Structures are given as C-alpha cells and as structure tokens.
Amino acid sequence: MHADGIKATGEVRLQLFGPDGKLKDKRHVQNLVVTAGLAVLADRMKGTPLKGEMTHMAVGEGTTAAAAGDTDLETPVGSRQTLTTGVSGAVITYSRTFAAGESTNSALTEAGLFNASTGGDMLCRTVFTAINKGGSDSLAITWTVTLS
C-alpha cells in the first residue's frame, strides 16, 4: 500500500528599513501552519470552496509560542493589511510592507496571515524576537508557504 501525505511548511523574511531607506534589521524565521489554516487549504481544493483565500497580514506584540490551535494573533498591533500573493508551482508567496505610520512604535514579535480584514481564518502564525518599528520605519514581510 502506498500512502501520500501533503505537508505545508512556511518561512518568513522580515526587513526593517529606517526613514532613509537603509536596512536596520532583518530576520528569517520558520512559522507554523495552524490547524485552521490546514482546513482552509483542504477547503480550497474542492470545486466550490467555502473559505476565502488569504488576503491580509497582521503583526503584533504577543510572545507565546505559535501553537496548532491558534486562530488569531495574541496581541495584534494596528489593523490587518492587504497583501500581495504569488504562486509558483507548489510555493505560495505573500508579501506586505507595513509603511511608516502603520503598526508603529511597537516591539513587534508576531505575525499572521488571514483570509479576512477581521475575523475569518488564520493560515499561519510566527513568533520572533522583537523588531522595534518606529513611526518613520517600514517593515517588509515576505511569507513563503510550500506544499510538499
């Protein structure tokens, strides 16, 4: 008997830029595709999916480790922001730059992907050491989810 399994893994690249456009900080961290996110992926594989595609990204100040049962960020900062999506083979890339004035003056420590501006389903969550985003800084986040 042959058994196939689909695995969803993700990684996140974070780049903090100062008001002068110079790179101040960068990170590369793994993330967790949460249980609710796996349900979204399964739903999207049927002919008429009931769950929407990922459309928003959010950041926060929560420090509790990501867990499979997570459905939202622990401590969101600011509102969820629309994101750009690209697909190449079995790799989906989500990106968003939180510009100066968005989610500012915060020690950001978590991020997540969602299929709605409020409520909805969370696909992924990651927790990282603090990135201090000032009011004039911008934070570029690129999230890659690979199905294998």
Image (cartoon, rainbow, N blue to C red):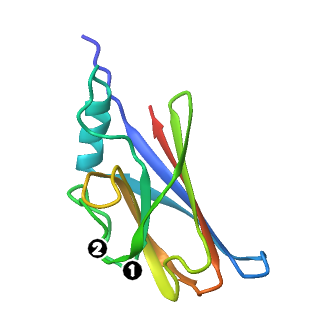
Tell me the quadrant of the picture where the C terminus can be found. top left
The residue shown at (27%, 51%) is: 121
Secondary structure, mark 1, is loop
Quadrant in the picture for residue 63 = bottom left
Q: Position of residue 80 (x, y in %)?
A: 41, 65
The residue shown at (59%, 87%) is: 134
Q: What is the crowding at mark 1: few (fewer than 14 residues within 10 Å), some, or many (at least 20)?
A: many
Residue 74 image label: 2
In the figure, 76 relative to 32: above or below?
below
Residue type at mark 2 is: Glu
- Closest to the observer, 17 or 4: 17
Q: Position of residue 142 (x, y in %)?
A: 57, 55
Q: Position of residue 32 (x, y in %)?
A: 36, 54
Residue 142 appears anywhere in the view: no
- Closest to the observer, 78 or 17: 78
- Left or right position of 12 against 52: right
Total number of numbered discs in the rendering = 2
Q: Is mark 1 in CB contact (under 8 Å) with mark 2? A: yes
Q: Which residue is mark 1?
A: 61
Q: Earlier in the sequence, mark 1 or mark 2?
A: 1
In the figure, 104 relative to 139: above or below?
below
